Image: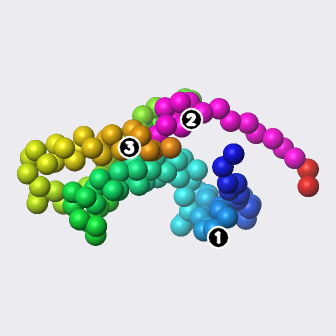
Amino acid sequence: MSKILWAHRQGKKHYVGQNERGAKVEIGMGENQFTPGELLQLALATCHTFSADHVFSAALGQDFAAAVGVAANKDLRRDSYSHLTVEMVADLSSLRKEQISLLREKSQEAIDKYCTVGHTLDDGASYDFKLLSE
């Protein structure tokens, strides 16, 4: 089993999530807060770039600049995401066409091998909810 994450309720639809390393994130619907769905999307996007960071570094240099974004198609009837698209933007101008093609291929191989969030979504992970008393 993986490390446990937790969130403490701060008020109506407002939680603060935390991990064992002390990092915190505001979760909610208000200002400076991420919704749970946004966190899922960011988890997928950054999992992609984390998984292939070594490939990008080898091609673009250790200190390459990049931004990663994610767009979601939402099924309002089901209240779920029907499709997510991850895009990474980086300066590829120093690479030849063949190098860009190889970078796309190698980064996709790394993502396919190492992206836990992508694997979890692909596999349709099951989950349980338990309500316990203190």
Kind of residue indicated by mark 2: Asp
Q: Categorize mark 3 by other alpha carbons within 10 Å: few (<14), some (14-19), many (20+).
A: many
Highlighted magenta segment, given as a residue range: 117-132
Vertical placement of 126 versus 15: above or below? above
- Quadrant for residue 18, please give it: bottom right
**Marks 3 and 2: in contact by CB < 8 Å?**
no
Q: Earlier in the sequence, mark 1 or mark 2?
A: 1
Relative placement, left or right, of 44 versus 35 is left
Residue 73: x and y in percent read 42, 37
**Marks 3 and 1: in contact by CB < 8 Å?**
no
- Quadrant for residue 120, please give it: top right
Query: In the depicted view, which residue is nearer to us: 106 or 14?
Result: 106
What residue sits right under mark 3 in the picture? 111
What residue sits right under mark 2 in the picture? 79
What residue sits right under mark 1 in the picture? 22
Nearest to the eye among marks 1 and 2: give it: 1
The quadrant of the picture occupied by the C terminus is bottom right
Q: Residue at x 54, y 66 (%)?
A: 31
Vertical placement of 98 versus 5: above or below? above
Residue 37: x and y in percent read 54, 47
Kind of residue indicated by mark 3: Ile
Residue 121 located within the stretch drawn in magenta: yes
Kind of residue indicated by mark 1: Gly
Relative placement, left or right, of 117 versus 69 is right
What whole-number distance in Å separates the C-alpha atoms at marks 1 and 3? 27 Å
Please say whether residue 45 is visible from this viewpoint.
no
Q: Categorize mark 1 by other alpha carbons within 10 Å: few (<14), some (14-19), many (20+).
A: few
Q: Which residue is drawn at 19% across and 44% down?
A: 102
Residue at the left extreme of this rendering? 96
